[in-house]
Image: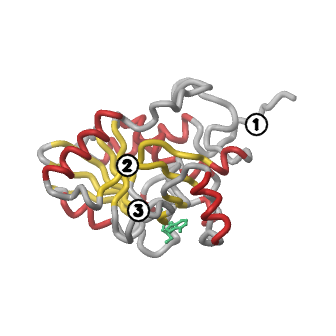
Amino acid sequence: MHISDNSCCCSFDECKRTSDWLLSQTRYRPKIAVVCGSGLGLLAEYLTSKQAFRYEDIPNFPVCTVSGHEGRLVFGKLNDKSCVFMQGRFHLYEGYSLCKVTFPVRVFKLMGVETIIVTNASGGLCQDFKVGDIMIIKDHINLPGFAGQHPLCGPNDERFGVRFPTMSDAYSEDLRKLALDISSELGYSSFVHEGVYCMVCGPNFETVAEARLLHKLGSDTVDYTDWT
Ligand SMILES: O=P(O)(O)O[C@@H]1C[C@H](O)[C@@H](CO)O1
């Protein structure tokens, strides 16, 4: 079968249009992006000299439909480093295609971002975790990906990356170590862990049997997101 439909909403040209628009509107050239999960938008308040854009004002950008996701892209400085924060993300269960869900990540790449920090409010599966604990993701299980729901399905544009990306080191070992070292210095080790994150589609929370299964498969947390 020859797939000729290349009209994906996150084609290189579409992403470039959004990236060029943002670069024309801000003097910031961030190398670091932070995606704020549910209820975590306040993280962006740590930025100084902020410049914010509402998602609905950014060409091609999806809009947030879930509470706890404000829907703003905030540029600014953190310890003198230019950063961009997403105050709100997009989920498959909102009805967005995975192409749209991951659209901001492609835009960030075209803007020059090199490091992305994703945060989310996920469900704990590991018996040792307590509500409110923090888990640093060391690896993930992309469950919908096993069933063909994968953001990299479709024609591959090498300008974004290779057709068959390696995933054995998806989460930077250096950054994970840094996060754990700083947690230890701050005396936070009792509630900061490392673990495996499992993506599911949502929007229902898992049944008890599903949660048990995901834990047996090796997941420590479960959530509906971290495609972004
Ligand atoms: O965006 P995140 O992953 O933080 O949001 C999670 C998933 C659902 O949107 C919501 C459910 O509580 O939190």
SS label for mark 1: loop
Residue closest to the eye, 206 or 42: 206
Measure how far apart labels 3 and 1 are at the Cα level: 48 Å
**Residue visible at 40% across and 64% down in the picture:** 129
Give residue 105's position: percent from left, percent from top: 46, 44
**Residue 23 lies in quadrant:** top left
Amino acid on which the number 2 mark rests in the picture: Glu
SS label for mark 2: strand
Q: Which mark is residue 103?
A: none
**Residue visible at 83% across and 28% down in the picture:** 2
**Residue visible at 35% across and 47% down in the picture:** 117
Residue closest to the eye, 42 or 110: 42
Label 3 sits on residue? 128
Label 1 sits on residue? 5
**Residue visible at 25% across and 46% down in the picture:** 180
**Neighbours of disc 3 within 10 Å: few (<14), some (14-19), many (20+):** few
Give residue 181's position: percent from left, percent from top: 20, 44
Residue closest to the eye, 92 or 181: 181
Give residue 153's position: percent from left, percent from top: 68, 38
Label 2 sits on residue? 194
Of badges 1 and 2, the one in the foreground is: 2
